[in-house]
Image (cartoon, rainbow, N blue to C red):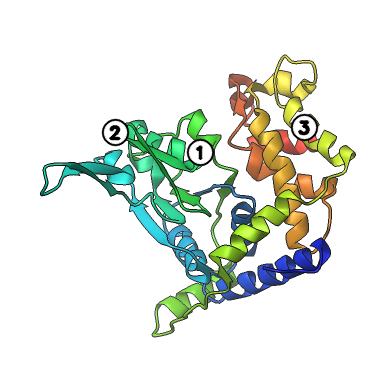
């Protein structure tokens, strides 16, 4: 791709973003903010965890996003009997009596990890290396994954039957943890009207693999002012109890705080959000707009917060004040 300068490139990204939103909204109703957050994750080279009760179109959303992107897409349905080799792949003996590696579904550009917490931690951990290093190790051999690579995982609330909570190390690899709520009445009317008739929507491919990789690199080159950088790192530092920069509410209500990866994602998310909106540098409001989805799965409340029915979102909001 050739642009005269970075300003022209950012304007092109903003245009693509608007096209992507418009196309996806042909099929997904009342989830505009969720669509935006998933697209921010994609252009940030991050991974996304979508949490909500069954029936909120989490899987349909991921399927629709995959349709408008020119990428190879694989779905993995996580079940209690799923094994790591079902995700990564396995070695078999071929006709020449030599071992041959058969690639698993992880070898794609977009992975839908459907109901990721329906499988035990042993199998969940099969995604760890791929999500962080974009490589897979099997039988002592390392295999590179094609770029771009995203894991979009759906999760049922952990209070439901037959779920296994994701370990903290795995949660930390997700850039965003997004909670889906029930649709508004008018949106649900549209959903029911369209899905109980012969109405069907076909989506067009809006962006290519090469364009996605180019725009991901562009986001990395977006400049950040020092005050925005300090705000993002300071916000993460405030969540760490019994440390020098810990906020009073943190020492009172938190057992564990966010690590440096949160600071990285706060800056990267703000840069991506700014570029998608056609801005050439992020401000503090951009950091605040991505903060809740980045921090909510990285901080752990203590018993006092549980007893007082204080949510993680309440604590994050207080820290941002």
> Mark 2 falls on what kind of element?
loop
Q: Nearer the viewer, residue 101 or 235?
A: 101
Spot occupied by residue 209 in the image (x, y as percentages of width and height):
54, 64
Spot occupied by residue 120 in the image (x, y as percentages of width and height):
33, 34
Residue 133, label in figure:
1
Disc 3 from disc 2: Cα separation: 39 Å
Residue at 76%, 65% (x, y): give it.
9
User: To which residue does mark 2 refer?
Assistant: 139
Mark 3 against mark 2, which lies toward the viewer? 2
> Mark 3 falls on what kind of element?
helix
Image quadrant where residue 6 sits: bottom right
Mark earlier in primary sequence (1, 3): 1
Residue 277, compared with residue 155, is above or below; it is below
Residue at 46%, 56% (x, y): give it.
110
Spot occupied by residue 165 in the image (x, y as percentages of width and height):
43, 34
User: To which residue does mark 3 refer?
Assistant: 233
Q: Is residue 105 left or right of residue 207?
A: left
Q: Is residue 46 visible?
A: yes
Spot occupied by residue 19 in the image (x, y as percentages of width and height):
65, 74
Residue 160, compared with residue 272, is above or below; it is above
Disc 2 from disc 1: Cα separation: 17 Å
Q: Is residue 82 left or right of residue 129?
A: left
């Amino acid at each position: 791709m050739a642009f005269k300068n970075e300003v022209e490139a950012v304007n092109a990204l903003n245009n693509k973003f608007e096209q992507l939103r418009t196309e996806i909204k042909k099929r997904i109703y009342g989830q505009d903010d969720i669509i935006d957050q998933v697209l921010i994750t994609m252009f940030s080279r991050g991974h996304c965890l979508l949490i909500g009760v069954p029936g909120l179109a989490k899987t349909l959303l991921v399927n629709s996003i995959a349709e408008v992107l020119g990428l190879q897409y694989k779905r993995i349905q996580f079940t209690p009997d799923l094994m790591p080799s079902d995700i990564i792949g396995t070695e078999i003996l071929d006709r020449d009596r030599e071992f041959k590696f058969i690639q698993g579904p992880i070898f794609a550009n977009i992975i839908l990890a459907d109901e990721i917490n329906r499988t035990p931690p042993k199998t969940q951990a099969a995604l760890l290396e791929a999500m962080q290093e974009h490589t897979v190790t099997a039988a002592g051999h390392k295999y590179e994954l094609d770029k771009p690579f995203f894991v979009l995982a759906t999760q049922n609330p952990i209070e439901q039957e037959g779920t296994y909570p994701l370990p903290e190390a795995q949660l930390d690899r997700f850039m965003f943890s997004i909670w889906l709520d029930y649709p508004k009445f008018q949106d649900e009317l549209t959903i029911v009207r369209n899905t109980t008739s012969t109405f069907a929507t076909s989506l067009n491919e809006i962006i290519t693999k090469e364009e996605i990789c180019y725009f991901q690199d562009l986001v990395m080159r977006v400049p950040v002012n020092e005050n925005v950088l300090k705000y993002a790192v300071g916000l993460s530092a405030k969540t760490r109890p019994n440390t020098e920069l810990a906020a009073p509410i943190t020492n009172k209500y938190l057992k564990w705080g966010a690590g440096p990866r949160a600071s990285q994602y706060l800056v990267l998310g703000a840069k991506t959000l700014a570029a998608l909106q056609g801005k050439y540098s992020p401000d503090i409001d951009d950091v605040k707009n991505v903060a809740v989805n980045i921090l909510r799965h990285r901080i752990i409340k203590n018993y006092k917060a549980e007893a007082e029915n204080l949510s993680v979102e309440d604590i994050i909001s207080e820290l941002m004040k």
